[in-house]
Image: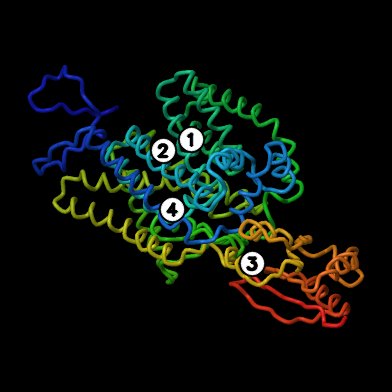
Amino acid sequence: MTLTAHPVGTSSSTPARPVHLLWAGRPGTGGSRPATDSQWVALAILATVVALALRGTALTAKSLWFDETFSVFLASQPVTRLLALVAANDPHPPLYYLLLHFWIVVFGNGEVAVRALSVLISTASVLVTWLFGRRLVGPLPALLAAGFVAVAPSQVATGQQARMYGLLTLIGIASWWVLQTAVSGGRRRAWIIYALGLAAMIYTHYYGFFIWASQGAYLAWRRTTGSVDWRRWVYASLAVLLLFLPWLPAFIDQLASGRAWPAHRSPLSWTLPVDTLWGMTMTGSIVNAVHRGAWTVQAVSTAGVPLVGIAAAGLLGLIAIRSRKYPRDAKGLLLFAALFPLLLSLLVSLGINVFSPRYLVFIMPAIALVMGAGISAVWASPRRWATSAAVALAIAVLVPNAIGLVSFYRKPRLDVFDWRRIAQALAAEARPDDAIVFLPGLSRIPVNYYFRGPQPRLALTPDGADVVDAGGARMGAVVGFLARHPRVWIVTVPPVPTSVNAMIDALRVNSYTLTKQGSINMAHLILLERLSGR
C-alpha cells in the first residue's frame, strides 16, 4: 500500500503524491519547504554537468592503453571487415565498435575524439540514474545517487576510455528502468523497448547476460510466475535470442577458442569481489590493463580500508531495505540490480573464470541508488541527530571518492605501458631504413596508432611460436628479411617470449650486435646494429 500525504489546507479529494516523492524535511522538526520539481531538475542537471566536466578533464593526460588502441583499430575498418575481425580476434561483441566506427567517420580518431564518445555515454548514465531513481525511490535518493555516480573514480575512469564498459553501464541501468516501467504499466510498447534494449546490451558485452538473468530472477522473486509480466518477459527474451542469432556462430567460436574468457584473467579469490565492491562504493579503484585484470588501488594502501568501506555501504543498504519509506518491489529491484550480477559472475567463475572487476562497473548506479536511499531514510528519521548523521554518511561516501579522483588525475596512466612514449622514442631514434619487430605482435597496434613511420614492421605471434628458436619455422625467413636493414629494433612487453633471445642470437650470427636497450615502464626496446664492413 502506498502512503500518501496531503498539503495542509487541502481536502482529501486533492490528488495526493506518494510520500517517497516528497522532501518535506525531517518529521517532528517543523519540516522545511519542499523542493519543487524544477529545483530537483536543476540539481540533477548540475550533477550531470559535474559528471561531464570530470570525465572531460585531462583526456590527453594519459596514453591510450592497448585495448583502446585496439578499439580504434577495429573501428577504423570498413564495417564488413570490422565484423570479421571482431569475430576472429576479439573476445567481445561488436556494437560498441560499430558505434565508434561511425563516430570516427564524423569526428576523427584522435585521443580526445575517440574518448569523447565514452565521455558522453558515461555522463548520460548519471542522468538516467537520476530519472530512474526519481521514479523508483524519490528525488532525494536519486539526486544523491546521481552525485555518487558523477564522482565515482570507477565511472570517471571507464568514462574516459574508448571501450564498451560505459555503454554497458548506460544500457544496463536503462534496461532496469524500462523493465520497471513495463511491469508497473504493462504496456506492450515498453516490453518492445525492453527487448530491443536487452539485445543492444548483449551486443555490447557478454556480461549483459548476467543483467538479463538478474532481471528474470527479480521477476521470479516478485512471485509473478504465470502472470502477464512473467510471460511477457519470456516473450521479450525469446525476441532477444532471435536478434542474437546472427552473432551466435561468432560467439560460439569465441567460447571454443578461449578468446571470450582470456587465460590471463586473475585467479578467482575472495579479494577480487571485495576489491570490486570497494571500487564501486567508497574509494578510487581504477581499472588496470595489466596485472592480470585486477584493479589498482591508488587512493589507499591499508588492507582494512576496503572492508570498512564495504561495511559502510552495507549499513546504508541495510537501512534502505529496512525502511518503510520505499516499496518492497523497489527495494528488491535495487538489490537484484546491484548484487545479483556479481554473484552470478562469481558462480560461473567457479567453473570457467569469467570474473573481471572492470566488467562489473555497470552495477555501480544501482549501488549508488541503494546508498542514496539509505541516506535519505536516515534524513527522514524524526530523531534529532538524523540530519547530522545523514550528512556525515553522504560525506563518508563522497570524500573517499574525491580522494580517488585526485589520485586518478595525478597518476593518469591506466596501465604500465605508456604507448605514446614508446612511439615517441621510436620516432625520435629510428631511422627510415631501420626495421621494427614486435613481440608480441599485437603491440604493433598501439605503436602504429601514435607513430606511422616508413620503417617496415613485423608483428610475430604473441608467444613467438613461429620463431621460437634457430630452427623455428620462420626464423630463417624473418632474419633473412631483417638482414636487409642496417639496424633492427625489437619491441617486447611482458611476458617476454623466449623467442626474443632466440632472435637476438640469430641476428648476432648474421653480424649484428646489441648496441642499446632500455625500458619505458614495462615495455622493452632493443636495438641491434649490423657491424660495419659486414
- Circle 4 residue: 156
User: What amino acid is found at the position of numbered circle 3 in the picture?
Assistant: Ala
Viewer-side label of 1, 4 = 4
Q: Which residue is depicted at the point 28% across and 53% down?
A: 394
| Secondary structure at numbered mark 1 | helix
In this orientation, which residue lies closer to the viewer: 10 or 347? 10
**Image location (x, y in percent) of residue 444:** 70, 60
Q: Quadrant of the C terminus?
A: bottom right
Whether pointer 1 and pointer 2 mark residues with C-beta atoms closer than 8 Å, the reply is yes
User: What amino acid is found at the position of numbered circle 1 in the picture?
Assistant: Tyr
| Secondary structure at numbered mark 2 | helix
- Circle 1 residue: 218
Is the residue 311 above or below the residue 148 in the image? below
Label 1 or label 3, whichever comes before in sequence order:
1
Q: CA distance from mark 3 to mark 2?
A: 56 Å
Horizontal side of 360 relative to 11 (left or right) equals: right
| Secondary structure at numbered mark 4 | helix
Q: Which residue is depicted at the point 48% across and 35% down?
A: 218
**Image location (x, y in percent) of residue 448:** 66, 58
Q: CA distance from mark 4 to mark 2?
A: 27 Å
- Circle 3 residue: 427
